[in-house]
Image (tube, grey):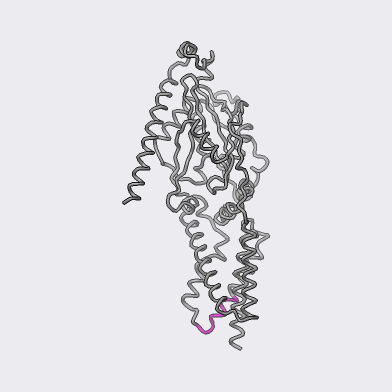
Amino acid sequence: MASCRGALTKQLKRILRIFWTTHSLLLAMMLALIAPSQYATAARADNKVTVLPDSSNFVTASLLTMSPTKGIYSTFGHVAFRMECPVHGLDFVFTYESDPGANGLLTFFAGKADSYYVAVSTQQFLKDMKKEGRGIWQYELNLTLHEEQNLWRNLDNDMLQGAHRKFNLQNHCVSTMITLIQQSCIDEYLEFGPQQGEMLLNNGDLLRHYVGKSKWAEFAFISFIGTHYEEYDSQDVRVSPQNIASELARASFVSTIDGSHRPVLTGKTEELLHGYNTDKGWGITPIVLFAILLLLTCLITFGERRWHWKQIARWYDKALLVAQTLASIVLLAILFGSNVFGHCWNWYLIPFNPLPLLIWTCFHKQKNFGRVYIIYTVVLAAFIALTPFISQLDVPHQLLVVTLAVRCLSKYLEYKKNIK
């Protein structure tokens, strides 16, 4: 009952916040739709910002980029819109957020996390980002006044729809931002420049480039990406918060009337916050942890054969089988139920699938069951040999495969010894 009451209170606070923000934004949009020049005299009288003769500063739209953090949800960084109407003192950040729910990690990778735009005052947003130690850079968009008004209206309408998207490769902070800019254009469209640099990499190598030092985030993403690794998504989906500014700097708004081009960014940039939480390291890396696990496996195997650590080895094998099964269940769930990396073959299903547990459960009491171990050892050895030829396969994952192979081979040798 307490959890339900807490959930209702949280939801009520969200509704009130959206109501308050929407009220302010609707007022801003009503004012923005009226000829801005009508407010120039009043603005001067109130000692506020004066509207320029061409009204270009009545509404300002900017792109905000934020540095990454250690959290797996923000390891790529983040982007948001900043919408300002200086004449009337309105300044909001529209940020695309996701709510992973109770099973955060699985919900995130399954592409089931509710996602939506929320608007907060820029002052509050900067305060929150400063607490996280994140850097923020601002790039002014080269939209016309009416396009900026359209963008503000579209953001407002999108926010009012609530969580009508699910976070996935097509719906993330960058892709939705680009979509909203496209929808706000009048008689023109946004066209990216030719791909260059890291954008020429395939999906998997590009992902590795983005995550940088976040080796555990890299391990998690690579575990689920499957053959999607080798593919090339559209440019608007592949752009990251880390390179959106440089990509838009090379992009153009193209007129549908005469084909003329103009830059997407005005060139006005500003560092709003200097980030100090830039170290994305997670301490011990997967390759180190799994190397230690392999050494422990070799030690237990040696002790089993030399010092008769039968009981220790038996419990260790059970732990490995449980871990292998749990990993296989997650991989299968992502493969068949994910909107992120689902619906494409995942090579790690060869060593990590429920078949070993099923076979052991049904046949481990059979006299010749030991032969199964050599079959699985050969399969694992062949999988390891494929490492240079399949991009998804890497050292951290293959250390786990070697660990399984060592124990399977040991079990087979023990079986051969007992039948002599």
Q: Is residue 223 above or below residue 186?
A: below
Point out residue 200 in the picture as x, y percentages from the top left corner.
Answer: 65, 44
> Which of the two residues, 265 or 129, is positioned nearer the viewer here?
129
Region rendered in magenta:
366-374
Could you say where residue 115 lies in the image, as x and y percent from the top left? 45, 42
Residue 228 shown left or right of residue 36 in the figure = right
Q: Is residue 14 above or below residue 320?
A: above
Visible residue check, residue 328? yes
Residue 371 lies within the magenta run: yes
Residue 22 in magenta? no
248 lies above or below 204: above
Q: Toward which corner of the image does residue 246 lie, by quadrant?
A: top right
Task: Please indicate, yes or no, whether residue 174 appears anywhere in the rendered image.
Answer: no
Furthest residue in direction bottom, as rendered:
420
Taking depth in this image into account, of 36 and 144 the one nearest to the observer is 36
Residue 264 at x, y percent in the picture: 59, 29
197 sits to left or right of 171? right
The image quadrant that residue 348 belongs to is bottom right
x, y percent for residue 47: 50, 14
